[in-house]
Structures are given as structure tokens and as C-alpha cells.
Image (spheres, rainbow, N blue to C red):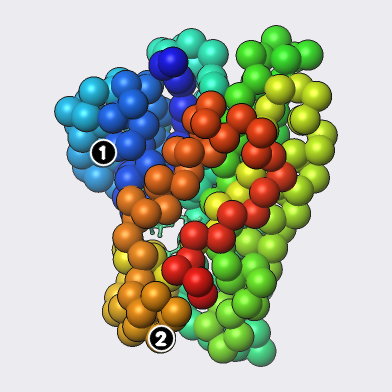
Amino acid sequence: MSKVVLITGASRGIGRAAAILCGERGWSVGINYAGNREAAELTAEDVRKAGGQAIILQGDVAVEADVIAMFDETEKQFGQLDGVVVNAGIVAPSQQLADMSAERLKRMFDVNVLGAYLCARESARRLSVERGGKGGSIVLVSSVASRIGSPFEYIDYAGSKAAVDTLALGLSKELGAQKVRVNAVRPGLVNTDIHASGGQPDRAHRLGVNTPMGRPGEAVEIAEAIVWLLSDASSYTSGALLDVSGGR
Ligand code: NAP
């Protein structure tokens, strides 16, 4: 059955890979991005080539008006949503907490926590059957950092992802009767641009060799789990925190 899905942070990395897998299923995808329009357009092109429909949606998930606008536009173009992937997230350069500025902490929690909560809230409003939705699936992209704590690297990021885990647990219970399933995927070390944005482009490879599977993951390996959780094949899975981390 065809689905309408909105994916935040889908211009690059894990979100982009998930968008293309949705395209392969013939689904319609809203591709949100922050600033990299060229990358978003490339993802949209690849979704269409794969057999789906796509639109691109600029917006900062930490800005409420942007979040509402991206949901509105997706529903205007494709009809009522079936699924949302709350994926956009950031890291910052490695530091100990003692050295972190308030500005850094604020931006981390604005994007990764407030952004996730705003996107999840908007999803709850639009998917819940009692509010006129048709039910569906919300997939939150967390991280195994939430249970590791990421000392000496970014415990701000780790804490932001712990909030995402808790959001998945609570919201899955709020929305169970609304025919909305809510789950979190917790990737381990995945080969994407995010590590370069934290000042360590080789991080996934460098640390990945010491994980149980001896390598970093690829974005598509996380995307497979996300798309399974969006699909009807996971119809009895809700409130799960699914580690996709090569055993890390
Ligand atoms: P990435 O390659 O750095 O891509 C980040 C994506 O998020 C881009 O599409 C970017 O848009 C978008 N974005 C960033 N800030 C945004 C904002 N404020 N509003 C809207 N979009 C924004 O990251 P990734 O590795 O794919 O990570 C995706 C998710 O997986 C994140 O939540 C991350 O924490 C989580 N994760 C990643 C790893 C890993 O090892 N890669 C591990 C665990 C968890 P632009 O292209 O426009 O900048």
C-alpha cells in the first residue's frame, strides 16, 4: 500500500537513505533539509528514480513555524500522512562538559530535543484517529549514545538522545489507542557526514573497527530498520528502542 512519509534531515546521511528506500516502495516522501538545497534536490531526484514521489522542504526543526509548514506542505502535496521519521540531528566538536559553552548546549538541545518534540507533536496531531488522522507510524532516530553517555566526546548529544528515547517510550503509550505506533532506532557508528561536522571525519572508521562487528555501519543499514518500522510489517511493534549498532 502506498504511503505518505515526511523525513526530517533527509538531504544527507541516514535520512537520505531512508527516503530512497521509501521511493523504492513507491511511497511519497517529504524531504526536509536545513540549508543544503543541492543535496535535498539530489535526494528527491533519487527517490523519483527509485519509483516514488518527492518534494523538498527547507526548515529548521528547532523553529516551530518551520515544522508546522513542512507538515502542512507535505499533506497539501500528497494527502494525509502515514508516517514520520524524526531524524534531523546534530553533534558538535568533542569536548568535556567542563569546557562546553551555554550556546553550544542550547543549540544541541534546541535541535535534538526541542526539534524532535515539535516534530513528534505535529505527528501526533496529524496521525491520531481522534484528531482526524488515519493512524500510522512515527520513527524517532536516537543513538546508542543515550546508553553509553559519550564521555570526553559529547555528553550533551548523548543526553539529547536519552530524551528522544524517553519520548518514544511515553508517546507510544499516549498514542497506542490512536492507531499510531512510535518507536526509536538507535544507530551505532555510521558512515555519514555527521562525524566531519563534529571535527572528526574518520571517526566512524576509527572507532568502528573496535566494535563487535569490526566495522562502521552504512546509512542504508539503518534506513532498512527505519523503513521496516514505517511499514505494516511491524504492525505490532510500538515503544521499542531498536539498536542498529553492529553489537556496540
Ligand atoms: P548527517 O549526515 O550530518 O545529516 C544531517 C541531516 O540533518 C542533513 O540532512 C541536514 O540538513 C539535517 N539537519 C541538520 N540540522 C537540521 C535542522 N536544524 N533542521 C532540519 N534539518 C537539519 O547526519 P546523519 O549521520 O545522517 O544523522 C541522522 C540522525 O542519526 C541524527 O539524529 C543523528 O544524531 C543520528 N545518529 C547518527 C549516527 C552516525 O554515526 N551517523 C549515530 C547515531 C545516531 P542539511 O543537509 O541541509 O545540512
In this rendering, position of residue 77 left or right of residue 81: left
The numbered disc on residue 43 is 1
Asked which secondary structure carries label 2, the reply is loop
Amino acid type assigned to the residue bearing label 1 in the image: Thr
How far apart, in angstroms, are the residues tagged by discs 2 and 1? 32 Å
Q: Residue drawn 54% across and 38% down?
A: 229
Mark 2 or 1, closer to the camera: 2
Which quadrant does ligand 1 occupy?
Answer: bottom left
Whether residue 96 appears in this view of the structure is: yes
Asked which secondary structure carries label 1, the reply is helix
- Classify the position of the N terminus by image quarter: top left
Whether disc 2's CB lies below 8 Å from ligand 1 is answered: no
Q: Is residue 222 above or below residue 41?
A: below
Q: Given contact means CB atoms under 8 Å apart, are the residues at marks 2 and 1 in contact?
A: no
In the image, residue 186 lies at what x, y percent?
A: 55, 59
Quarter occupied by residue 98: bottom right
Q: Residue drawn 22% across and 29% down?
A: 50
Q: Is residue 150 above or below residue 114?
A: below
Which residue position is annotated with label 2? Answer: 210
